[in-house]
Image (cartoon, helix red, strand yellow):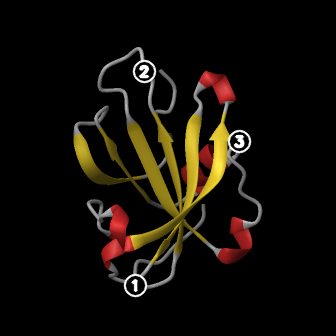
Amino acid sequence: MNKIPKIGCACEKPTSDYTEYRSSELGIDHTNGRYAEVTIEQCKLCQRIWIRYFVEFEHYSKSGRWYKGIVSKKDRLQITPENAVDYLESLEWYVYGGSFFESTGILGSGKMKVDA
C-alpha cells in the first residue's frame, strides 16, 4: 500500500475546487469501454501531484464519478490511463465523488466503482 502523509493542505479536503490545480491530460482509459478521462493535477499551494480519474456512462443518469489521489514524482512517470485505477486502489486513501455517489467529495480507499 502506498502511504501518502496528509500535510493539512486545502487540496486534501474532499471538496477542494478545481481552480486550486494546474491540470494536464494524461489520456483516455478505454478498459471495459469506460472512456475515462485521466488527468494529472498539481496543487497550486503545496505543489503535490494528483492523478484524477473521471468516468461517466452517457446512457445512465447520475453515473458520473471521479477519483483522485496523490502520486509521488517517481511513481508519476509509471502511470498510464490504463493502470490509473490500479494505482489509485493501491493508495492508503483517495478522494472520490460525483453524481453517482451524490457527493462533492468523500475520503475513501480500496476498490473503486468504475464500471457501469
Q: Secondary structure at mark 2?
A: loop
Near-viewer residue (22 or 101): 22
Name the side, left or right, on which 43 lies relative to 28.
left
The residue lying furthest to the right in this view is 78
Q: Which residue is mark 3?
A: 82
Name the side, left or right, on which 98 lies relative to 42.
left
Crowd around label 3: few <14 · some 14–19 · many ≥20 (10 Å) = some
Q: Nearer the viewer, mark 1 or mark 3?
A: 1
Q: Which mark is residue 64?
A: none
Q: Nearer the viewer, mark 2 or mark 3?
A: 2
In the rendered image, residue 111, in percent from the top left (x then y), is placed at 50, 40
Residue appearing at x 71%, y 57% in the figure: 79
Q: Secondary structure at mark 3?
A: loop
**Could you tell me the amino acid type at mark 3?**
Glu
Question: Pointers 1 and 2 in contact (CB under 8 A)?
Answer: no
**Could you tell me the amino acid type at mark 2?**
Glu
Question: Pointers 2 and 3 in contact (CB under 8 A)?
Answer: no
Crowd around label 2: few <14 · some 14–19 · many ≥20 (10 Å) = few
Residue appearing at x 43%, y 80% in the figure: 44
Q: Which residue is mark 2?
A: 58
Residue appearing at x 29%, y 26% in the figure: 62
Residue appearing at x 42%, y 45% in the figure: 66
Task: Answer with the quarter of the image where residue 97 lies.
Answer: top left
- Whole-number angstrom distance, CA of label 1 to CA of label 2: 34 Å
